[in-house]
Image (cartoon, helix red, strand yellow):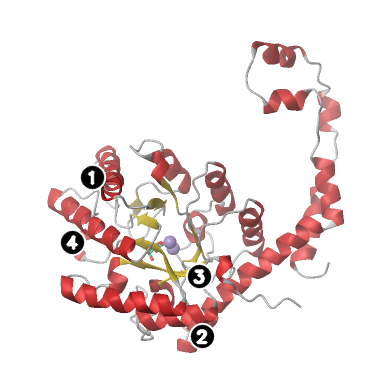
Amino acid sequence: MATYTPQKSDKFTFGLWTVGNPGVDPFGGAVRTPVTPVERVRKLGELGAYGVNLHDNDLIPFGASATEQDAIVKEFQSVLAESGVVCAMATTNLFSHPVFKDGAFTSNDPKVRAFARQKVMRSIDLGVELGAPIYVFWGGREGVEIEASKDPVTAAKRFRDALDFFTEYVLDQGYDLKFALEAKPNEPRGDIYLPTTGAMLGFISTLAHPEMVGVNPEFAHETMAGLSFYHAVAQALEAGKLFHIDLNGQKPGRYDQDYRFGQEDYKQNFFLVKLLEDYGYDGPKHFDAHPLRTSDPDDVWEFAKGCMRTYLIFKDKAAQFNADPEIQAIWRQISVRDAVLDPILDGKYSPQNAQTLKSHAFDADALAAQKLPYEKLDQLVFDLLLGVR
Ligand code: GLT
Ligand code: MN
Ligand code: MN
């Protein structure tokens, strides 16, 4: 029986804010007092996590002096070294302070936009000091409730100007840092700009340095909009833009639940893990989730263990899928090959190829009559996932 013990090579990471979540929701305050960031890193290291992620203010209180920051950073660096945990990703908190209540990069006020840029540059410096290779941008407050309050075309331009400024800043400093953009359809804003991973992918191609920028899709964010997270991740992978991933649990059509990875929709999560494994995604797997409000401090660590264990169980199931003779026989049956047409379809346009396709005789009725035993295939997947195969 496999033990599903996490290894550093699994590259599992947690945000300081995930295992440090005190259980606040819009209807009630904190239900637990999280241990310090240093203790969180120590415990994550013991549990086999590879890395930790942070917003500037998860570690450095808003408005702390340079001397205070230095002392905090020093202590944090030594716990990283002791526990063998890396800082895998850093980001900026551009959503908690009231100054950002109507946006950061897209605020109508140039002073707010400039302050946001200052905060990001300082936070990039911090992330690089801690060794983070990836920097995430989640524009939680970049959006509106009242359409009359902002011009969305101007907002798109402001968002782009900010990102172009930061890629130049990174190049200017000689930092080895990549950006990953995280989409979310709504919450905390009524509508957040660039609401899906697909929208982010389109936006990236308009940037000054698209090669430095990828995406950080989150399971909950595509799923709350009723979209397929699995397909969003596949598109990002295929485009070479999956720089980071936020894994968690979510029911469609609800607020952002950020449940333990795998808590909801086992089948979708199975295919997601299979996708990441089959295509050799080698970035961090970040569990951007939080324990239930009902969890006591011990249950918080059960939550963290559960995220990693679930991933490893799905990984094991993906290997079973790939080795299952009956499943693979169906897969071979539906993976039709054609010696004449495949080279044309896989190749580029040429007048000759166009002519061949235009004059080819197809038997549409025979093609339509081909067997597609998907009921059988899906039942085999179900049996496999439920452990009766
Ligand atoms: C916040 C948000 C997450 C983002 C984090 C990065 S912060 O918790 O809900 O999805 O990934 O800023
Ligand atoms: Mn996230
Ligand atoms: Mn979320």
Q: Secondary structure at mark 3?
A: loop
Quadrant for the C terminus in the image = bottom right
Q: Quadrant of residue 101?
A: bottom left
Q: Amino acid at mark 4?
A: Val
Q: Which residue is mark 1?
A: 150
Q: Secondary structure at mark 2?
A: helix
Q: Which residue is mark 4?
A: 99
Position in image of residue 171 (x %, y %):
30, 46
| Crowdedness near tag 1: few (<14), some (14–19) or many (≥20) residues, C-alpha within 10 Å | some
Of badges 4 and 3, the one in the foreground is 3
Report the disc number at residue 299: 2
CB of residue at label 3: within 8 Å of ligand 2?
Answer: no
| 88 is higher (above) or lower (below) than 81 | above
Q: CA distance from mark 4 to mark 2?
A: 35 Å
Q: Secondary structure at mark 1?
A: loop
Q: Which badge, 4 or 1, is on the more N-terminal residue?
A: 4
Q: CA distance from mark 1 to mark 3?
A: 42 Å
Q: Amino acid at mark 3?
A: Tyr
| 161 is higher (above) or lower (below) than 271 | above
Position in image of residue 316 (x %, y %):
71, 66
Q: Which residue is mark 3?
A: 50
Can residue 39 be seen here? Answer: yes
Position in image of residue 66 (x %, y %):
17, 70
Between 336 and 199, the residue placed more toward the observer is 336
CB of residue at label 4: within 8 Å of ligand 1?
Answer: no
Q: Quadrant of ligand 1?
A: bottom left
Between 374 and 241, the residue placed more toward the observer is 241
Q: Amino acid at mark 1?
A: Lys
Q: CA distance from mark 3 to mark 2?
A: 21 Å
Q: CA distance from mark 2 to mark 1?
A: 43 Å
Q: Which badge, 4 or 2, is on the more N-terminal residue?
A: 4
Q: Is residue 5 left or right of residue 155?
A: right
